[in-house]
Image (cartoon, rainbow, N blue to C red):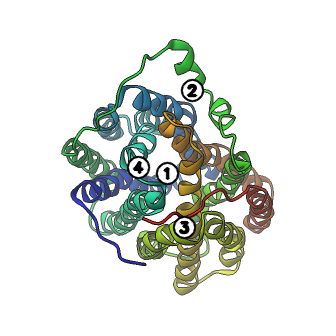
Amino acid sequence: MFSIKLNKEQLLVLIATSLYIMNVGVLIIGLQVYFIGKVSDFQIALLSSVYWIPIIFLSPFWGYIADATGKMKEIAVANLVGTAITTYLHTIFSDYTGIFILRIITGVFSSSYAPTIQAYITHKVRPEVFGRNLAVYNTGVAIGFLISGYMTSLIIIYLTIIYIFYVPTITSLLSAIFIALLPSKEIEPRKITIKSAIRAAIPISVALQLKRGRAIFLTIALAVRNIAIMGFFSLVYVYMQKVGIPSKNLGFLATFNNIMQIILIPIFGIVADNIGRKKTFIPGFILSMCIPLFFMKARTNLEFAIGFAFIGIGYSMLIAGANAYLRDVAPKGKEGEVLSLVNITRGVGMIIGPIVVGSIVAYYSYQVMFEVLVIIGMFATILAVACEEIYKKQPI
């Protein structure tokens, strides 16, 4: 039941995704260290928001283009190269204004990866293995963040902070190479229309295509949950430094989240294929709701490590079930667009969350911030419960 074996295609996706995510992971922590004391906490949080604004609108657009042309890997490769170039430019335009603009441009390129690669790895496979195939992608995400944590700490300890831009540049290029090694998918192309492309760039139009299982509730729930968790991540490393955690420890402590994901995402992907999607993601929402409580009381390295471990457990259940659920309800020929909703909801979280969190911290306190995040997580859980399970396992 829990046998996990990877074919060549899955292995390449796993490695490429890990390398791609290192771009995101190193900069999430690195930019908070790079700018602490130079600009306000609110300005630091904004760097997360502006990166995700283009992702909200362009993820479904790239999903539409991938579905229509079948050029999933080619689109991913081109945009990974673009991501590498703009990341390198951070070393040249390294003041706050320059990096602010470059975060937006990098988001434009980065927006294509998730919808194109998730559509690629689930193309022409049975629904009974959607969970485990998507788990390959999500495990790659976890591995990328795990390595990012260690890498960021090593950069801070042994190198100058500017290397937080050099390392992600290299990993993005390596990711492009591994994606280029994937075989092309045989998909009959369909005509691309300007009207359809524009419609695809409007996230709500993609969500409204979900006719089955009240899946719209899950989409909204993911967005609300991500407002809480992404807002949390936009300042958590600043908070940890302010309560006495050395900056060199931040990356190492964050990896407890990713270690749990690497262990559990493949397992919960199989669980979602066997017992159902909703039964897998609802406990993930509940645990995510409680996460801010762990951090509100944490003061030691051990306490923060435990908090990050619980983030990993909750996320593993949530993403394994929710990703497979959205793939189940995707209309034929719109798989990339619908799978882009996960990226869109993450983008909503990364735009709104940091602004909410930054404003609360600016006018109140970190404790009030944590309390508000718990309430937001509770609302997300209620919304997730409202969707219906539609998956029924068939014999393989």
Residue 122, numbered circle: 4
Q: How many angstroms separate mark 4 from mark 2 (CA)? A: 22 Å
Q: Which of marks 1 and 2 is nearer the N terminus?
A: 1
Secondary structure, mark 3, is helix
Labels 3 & 1 near each other (Cβ < 8 A): no
Secondary structure, mark 2, is loop
Task: Bin the neighbour count of mark 1 within 10 Å (Cα to Cα): few under 14, some 14-19, many 20 and up.
Answer: some
Residue 39 appearing in the image: no
Task: Bin the neighbour count of mark 4 within 10 Å (Cα to Cα): few under 14, some 14-19, many 20 and up.
Answer: many
Q: Position of residue 68 (x, y in %)?
A: 42, 26
* Pointer 1 residue: 35
Of tags 3 and 1, the one toward the viewer is 3
Q: Which of 203 and 4 is in front in this view?
A: 4
Q: Earlier in the sequence, mark 1 or mark 4?
A: 1
Q: In the picture provided, is 189 more to the left or to the right than 37?
A: left
- Amino acid type, callout 2: Ala
Q: In which quarter of the image is the N terminus?
A: bottom left
- Amino acid type, callout 4: Thr
Q: Where is residue 282 in the image (x, y as percent from the top left)?
A: 68, 67
Q: Earlier in the sequence, mark 3 or mark 4?
A: 4
Of tags 3 and 2, the one toward the viewer is 3
Q: Is residue 272 above or below residue 77?
A: below
Q: Position of residue 90 (x, y in %)?
A: 36, 39
Task: Bin the neighbour count of mark 2 within 10 Å (Cα to Cα): few under 14, some 14-19, many 20 and up.
Answer: many
